[in-house]
Amino acid sequence: MNNENRPRRGLITLLAGVAAGLALLTGAGVANAENTPAQDQIDHIVAGQPDAIQTSPTTVTWRDSGVSLTADAAGPEQCGFNQFCLWEHSDFKGWMVSFNESSCAYVIELPSFGFNDVASSWVNNTARRVEVWEHSGAYGLRLWTEIPYTASRWVGEDAQDRASSLVCR
Ligand SMILES: [Ca+2]
């Protein structure tokens, strides 16, 4: 039974990807199209957090902290001045979450920003040293440390898809 379902699930995933591509090509004017995967993710986050607002077709911003989560920010240059950023995939691709230096006042909990256990590459454009931890509350393993004004296009097999919290030093 499970084996019979598998090809169909693959097809649905493929079609969702095609739909996302079409939505990007045609802009936001497709009123009757089903939600893109990005929009589904954004809807999910916005529904659960009053502080989070959608600020573009592919971006959620948290009003109090200025943290931003975006599906359309490939490349290390997308991480702004005085920001540090994580990407879902290696080579600065996939979803990107960006933090301002003001986020450093507390332990940053990645689950709050829809980014638990997904980070694979990063940029640190701040003068702060940023530690990245396996679990919430800076517990578990310290997966990597972001030296000021450096970047990594891949955190490595052992560290990818595990980060749950950040601490600035
Ligand atoms: Ca984790």
Image: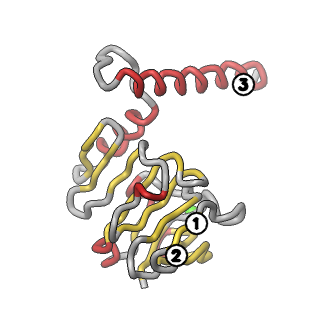
Residue 112 against residue 165 in the figure, above or below: above
Q: Nearer the viewer, residue 32 or 1?
A: 32
From the image, state whether disc 3 or disc 1 is nearer to you.
1
On the image, the x and y values in percent for residue 142 come to 59, 77
- Residue type highlighted by circle 2: Glu
On the image, the x and y values in percent for residue 91 come to 59, 54
On the image, the x and y values in percent for residue 66 come to 26, 60
- Residue type highlighted by circle 1: Ser
Q: Crowding at label 2, few (<14), some or many (≥20) Cα neighbours within 10 Å?
A: many
Q: Are marks 2 and 1 in contact (CB under 8 Å)?
A: yes
Give the quadrant of residue 33: top left
Give the distance between the C-alpha atoms of the residues marked 3 and 1, in whole angstroms: 35 Å
Of helix, strand and loop, which one carries label 3? helix
In the picture of the structure, the residue carrying the numbered disc 2 is 146
In the picture of the structure, the residue carrying the numbered disc 1 is 152
In the picture of the structure, the residue carrying the numbered disc 3 is 6
Q: Residue at x 23, y 53 (%)?
A: 51
Q: Crowding at label 1, few (<14), some or many (≥20) Cα neighbours within 10 Å?
A: some
From the image, state whether disc 2 or disc 1 is nearer to you.
1
Give the quadrant of residue 55: top left
Residue 7 against residue 69 in the figure, above or below: above
Q: Residue at x 71, y 61 (%)?
A: 157
